[in-house]
Image: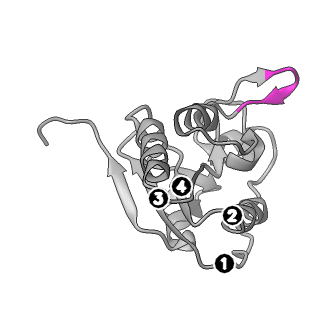
């Protein structure tokens, strides 16, 4: 397991969900847009996305593309989501299937770049809290702890 890179102090919120397709991206994109409307210099950031389609030889982070459109962001998709994987599996599993380990240094570098230009980051996770990102040792929950952000949970409405 790689050591955790140093991060700058920054303001933001982490958006997670109770499962896949619960609406995390819509909430994160909408929150980013609402903050911008209130003159908060905010940006959307999704460190890792799996299940990315390939267009013209590159993987497209579709969640970042939606957030970019909804919130009127100008950053390139690669800045909004630095780690992309094609397989529609948990990111740690998708990475292992193609023989790579997710690079936390790239996430840290992405955050450092965004913090230099934005005052608030709306960070979207991949799946729920216990989704593996690196083997079974580093989960979305560990990512949240590393980032040191408050957490908002998106859930389906219903009993239970």
Neighbour class for label 3 at 10 Å: few (<14), some, many (≥20)? Answer: many
- Measure the alpha-carbon separation of dots 2 and 3: 13 Å
Q: Is residue 115 above or below residue 14?
A: below
Observer-nearest of 135 and 47: 47
Name which quarter of the figure residue 10 lies in: bottom right
Please report whichever mark, 1 or 2, sits nearer to the chain's N-terminal start: 1
Image coordinates for residue 125, horizontal then vertical, percent: 52, 50
Q: Is residue 35 above or below residue 8?
A: above
Answer yes or no: do the residues labelled 1 and 2 have beta carbons within 8 Å?
yes
Please report whichever mark, 4 or 3, sits nearer to the chain's N-terminal start: 3
Observer-nearest of 40 and 53: 40
Which element is circle 3 on? Answer: strand
Please report whichever mark, 3 or 1, sits nearer to the chain's N-terminal start: 1
- Measure the alpha-carbon separation of dots 4 and 1: 15 Å
Q: Which residue is mark 4?
A: 123
Image coordinates for residue 22, horizontal then vertical, percent: 37, 35
Answer yes or no: do the residues labelled 2 and 3 have beta carbons within 8 Å?
no
**At 40% across and 42% down in the image, what residue appears?**
27
Answer yes or no: do the residues labelled 4 and 3 have beta carbons within 8 Å?
yes
Please report whichever mark, 4 or 1, sits nearer to the chain's N-terminal start: 1
Which element is circle 4 on? Answer: strand
Q: Is residue 118 above or below residue 10?
A: above
Please report whichever mark, 4 or 2, sits nearer to the chain's N-terminal start: 2
Neighbour class for label 1 at 10 Å: few (<14), some, many (≥20)? Answer: few
Name which quarter of the figure residue 4 lies in: bottom right
Q: Which mark is residue 14?
A: 3
Q: Which residue is mark 1?
A: 8
Q: Quadrant of the C terminus?
A: top left
């Amino acid at each position: 397991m790689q050591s955790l890179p140093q991060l700058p102090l920054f303001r933001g919120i982490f958006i997670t969900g109770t499962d896949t397709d619960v609406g995390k991206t819509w909430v994160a994109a909408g929150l980013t847009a609402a903050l911008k409307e209130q003159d908060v210099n905010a940006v959307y950031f999704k460190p890792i996305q799996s299940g990315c389609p390939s267009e013209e030889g590159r993987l497209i982070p579709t969640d970042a593309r939606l957030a970019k459109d909804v919130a009127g962001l100008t950053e390139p998709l690669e800045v909004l989501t630095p780690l992309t994987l094609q397989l529609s599996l948990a990111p740690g599993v998708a990475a292992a299937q193609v023989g790579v380990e997710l690079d936390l240094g790239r996430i840290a570098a992405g955050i450092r770049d965004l913090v230099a230009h934005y005052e608030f980051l709306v960070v979207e996770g991949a799946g729920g809290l216990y989704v593996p990102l690196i083997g079974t040792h580093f989960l979305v929950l560990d990512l949240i702890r590393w980032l040191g952000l408050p957490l908002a949970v998106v859930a389906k409405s219903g009993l239970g």
